[in-house]
Amino acid sequence: MFPTSKKEVEALGWDYIDVIMFTGDAFIDHPSFGTAVISRWLQKFGYRVAVVPQPNWRDDLRDFRKLGAPRLFFGVNSGAMDSMVNHYTAAKRLRHDDAYTPDGKAGARPDYAVTVYTKILKELYPDIPVIIGGIESSLRRLTHYDYWQDKLFPSILVSSGADYLCYGMGERTMLEFTKGIENGWSIHKMRQIPQIGFYSKGTPPTGDNILHLHSFEECQASKKAFAENFHQIETHANMLTPSTIIEACGNGYVQINPTWPPATQEEMDSFWDVPYTKLPHPRYKGKRIPAYDMIKFSINTHRGCFGGCNFCTIAAHQGKFIQSRSEESILKEVRGLLGLPGFAGNISDLGAPTANMYGMGGRNKELCAICRRKSCLFPAPCKNLDRDHTRLLNLYHRVDSTKGINHSYIGSGIRYDLFLSEEGYVDNSSKPYLKELILDHTSGRLKVAPEHTQDSVLYYMAKPSFRLFERLRREFDAITAKAGRKTGIVPYFISSHPGCTMHDMEQLARHPALKGLYMDQVQDFTPTPMTTSSVMYYSGFDPRTMKPVFTEHNPDKKRLQKSYFFKKNDYPAKKTQKY
């Protein structure tokens, strides 16, 4: 286990620490948490890593001083969520709990945690490099809209004073960065590392493969400039070989280097081939961490998502291209679950951001290399996309046949447009996949995300027509009826999304296809940094087309929109309901 206190460092006999990680979450040594992932990865190469979880920033700062200065650098993240999303509801009300804190107590991290932690460290240890990472840093790496203060912020590199920023999934970046610091690389060489960002004073570089955005100040002055910036950022975030991005700010500029190529299967396996305990740190003995309860018996099969939903941040952080682990790597982890305390043979989630994208990608990789589409599924599935679920079904069968495994459930989201069209199943693997998903891998109710019923709103969400959900429900009902099951289907919906009017919510509430369905999985749209939907909300423009789009900003009308989810359908019941 990684040390979190001076006493624990001394117990290990360490006379120095290479890297000290500060995080806004409780420390859990599980691959679902970025702090553990990076700490284990650096440890694999011989580096001594200590972790300071949820340091107190309001006292004499003893938590920031207790381990002293590391030999190489400090790493900082806010935890598994942006700290503002963690703290506040869509109505900007303070949440009363925190799933990533022992006993779910709120208040263990500050607002804008990355910035707060970094400023403290730079004040106490001005000569020690600080690199920031994780969700909060990734999604705030360039000029972004902050919903909670209702204004544009510059890059978090500027507001925090951090020396470097690692965005996205950081194993390769952080190892290269650590080696560079250890070997005394020049600033120029450090600034060539892929998937890294930094702020520099002076004149920005020019040249081939450099994309110059509108400056932060230009974005402040023009919402259209901000929307134009975002379209460029998002386009390059979804390219296989993006350009270096430069955004001027103040008397300097922010530079964001291109990503590494998507991780190979062998690289993905190596990221998991480290000795995770999959347990909370011993310091939390006797305390419950709600987020851990949700994932302790889960397994990640791959990274990335090519769905391209406009309100989602997954691709901005994990990328569009699917990076899958081998079946052997996954099965090794499955067998490892058998030794965990409390494991009764049930895997809570065998999935990823989108569970049924495992092993998928373009048939012709050369076409993928030049593609500039944000989504492989919207406005229609790419003809180059291989949607065959055979490999995934074989994985399920191998997992379920493992001795000691009773059930493997799919708790992650699925994309039903990967196996269904409005006309029916898309290939020979589609119906077997849906049938097995419903009958063998659904615990309780199948949760899916149509998000809305009105195609005009779904266009702004970049989601398929609601007619596809109607088709899904027909197939679902047929499968469950034939099997004699009473499994239900639960649709997720969003209100107040850009483009959504009160009339649209009225139509949703009265839609006959929702008769008899639970409507408890609903939420009001929350603008989070670095999404197309948030840019629409702030700027009033659709960055894909630069055309104006309606956005509801009035809090009372936003509440009224959400209330339509819970209104009774006015249509009379029918014996035969056509969807």
Image (cartoon, grey):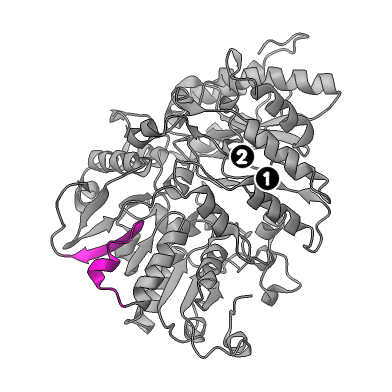
Residue indicated by mark 1: 350
Mark 1 touching mark 2, by CB under 8 A? yes
Alpha carbon separation for disc pair 1 and 2: 7 Å
Residue 145 is situated, as x and y percent measured from the top left of the image, at 36, 49
Q: Is residue 26 magenta?
A: no
Taking the spot 68% from the left edge, 24% from the top edge, the residue there is 568
Q: Amino acid at mark 1?
A: Leu
Which residues fall within the magenta stretch?
A: 184-201
Residue 215 is situated, as x and y percent measured from the top left of the image, at 20, 51
Q: Is the N terminus in the top left, top right, bottom left or bottom right quadrant?
A: bottom right
Residue 271 is situated, as x and y percent measured from the top left of the image, at 55, 58
Which of 454/450 is in front? 450
Residue indicated by mark 2: 355
Looking at the rendered structure, the secondary structure element under dot 2 is helix
Q: Is residue 151 left or right of residue 507?
A: left
**Mark 2 neighbour class, 10 Å CA radius: few under 14, some 14 to 19, many 20 or more:** many
